[in-house]
Image (cartoon, rainbow, N blue to C red):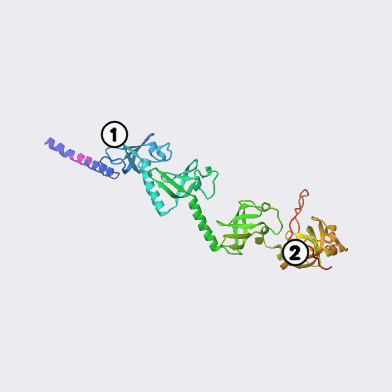
Amino acid sequence: MMDEHKDQEGAPHAAGNEMEEAMNMEESLAYGPTGDARPGDILQGKVVHISQDGVLVDVGAKSEGIIHLRDLSHRRVDRAEDVVQLGDVISVYVVGHEGEEGALKLSKRRADEELAWERLEEARSKNEVLDAPVVEVVKGGLVVDVGLRGFVPASLIAPGFVHDLEPFLGETVRVRVVELDRHKRRAILSRKDVLAEETKAKQEEIWSKISEGQVWDGTVKSITEFGAFVDLGGVDGLLHISEMSWTRINHPSELLEVGQPIRVKVIRLNPEKGKISLGLRQVEGSPWEKAAERYEEGRIYRGQVVRLATFGVFVQLEPGIDGLVHISQLADYRVTNPSEVVQIGEEIAVKVLQVDPERKRISLSKRDADAEGGLEAAVEAVPQEPEEPETPRRMTAYHAGDWEDELGEEESDPE
């Protein structure tokens, strides 16, 4: 009776143990087979212990498998906690057994790489673009993380030669797979191809929108003797030096610098040759538009001699506005050469005889201005800002309008 009673008392405890064992068995089955794992298998396992040397993973085998620190990731790892945490379910690659007890040796790095090879092969077949962090700069290119160590040769980083690769370290670059060799564990990627395609797409978009007369925001890309190239967002346009200012400048660097944002007007387009001509001065507007308001016929103004010709003198009234003093209007006596009366850079008084804004012409007379008081009687159409005494007044260019189309160097109007 006592033995029977003991059996009845132990029954609930035995049933509880059986249930616990069943639950443990079910949990183990969730991570892999209960039998011996074979080398080359990729299993799911749960991290059950973390140490300084590595981690233990339950894959449902007879014993936990071990992942050494070096096998946790293809990147350098100093602490296992930087890669996994207790309770994480991870994919592992079965390497084999080690030690006298035949402990199961696993590798998370190999599992990740096997899965990464599959993703890279799929990306190459679909021509997909991948985001890849740059983890190392080496001689000849960049090492990137695409689930394994991928390589971007220096020649495939950008369309042009890249002198310094260090700025790419830590950055994420957009790349496309160009070569895979799983046997040699080699993955070659290209950033240059992605940039070329993105640039082409931007260019097509811009050419579909751009038209003559539009004003665009751009950035000065480079400066040359004859002008500057302006990036309009993927397409470069040429801003010729003659279209930069209403006054003459000796070099584009007097107005612009590389990287400077500017607003430019589209002057001409040549889609067949992919050329865009731009203007900067047109955005500001021509000073000739208000010339008739500023310069009244019969009034005397101050001006600066900016050019001598055989038929007369060009006088700057303000930057971008030059008038002509015909040789017959220089003095009250016969003048054979303008240099007999005035010199370049000299400030003189001139009287306005006629204003023709459409043809960009102003006819002036020094002779009449001198007879009516000269510089003392002159006024300035545009107030001038005071200049530093030690700074010489910079010679600006003239805009001769259409004068020289009709007046040759040897021609002169009748007095």
In this rendering, the answer to whether 311 lies above or below 136 is: below
Q: Is residue 16 magenta?
A: yes
Q: Is residue 201 left or right of residue 329?
A: left
In this rendering, the answer to whether 261 lies above or below 152 is: below
Q: Residue farthest to the top?
A: 100
Element carrying mark 2: helix
Residue 257 at what x, y percent from top left? 64, 51
Element carrying mark 1: loop
In this rendering, the answer to whether 81 lies above or below 354 is: above
Q: Is residue 114 left or right of residue 35?
A: right
Residue indicated by mark 2: 404
Which residue is at 85% across, 63% downward?
Answer: 367
Residue indicated by mark 1: 102
Asked which quadrant contains residue 314, the reply is bottom right
Q: Is residue 24 left or right of residue 197?
A: left
Q: Is residue 200 magenta?
A: no
Q: Amino acid at mark 2?
A: Glu
Along the line of sight, the residue nearer the viewer: 390 or 343: 343
Q: Is residue 162 left or right of residue 294?
A: left
Along the line of sight, the residue nearer the viewer: 341 or 17: 341
Asked which quadrant contains residue 9, the reply is top left
Part of the protein shown in magenta: 11-17
At label 1, counting other C-alpha atoms closer than 10 Å, the crowd grade (few under 14, some 14-19, many 20 or more) is few
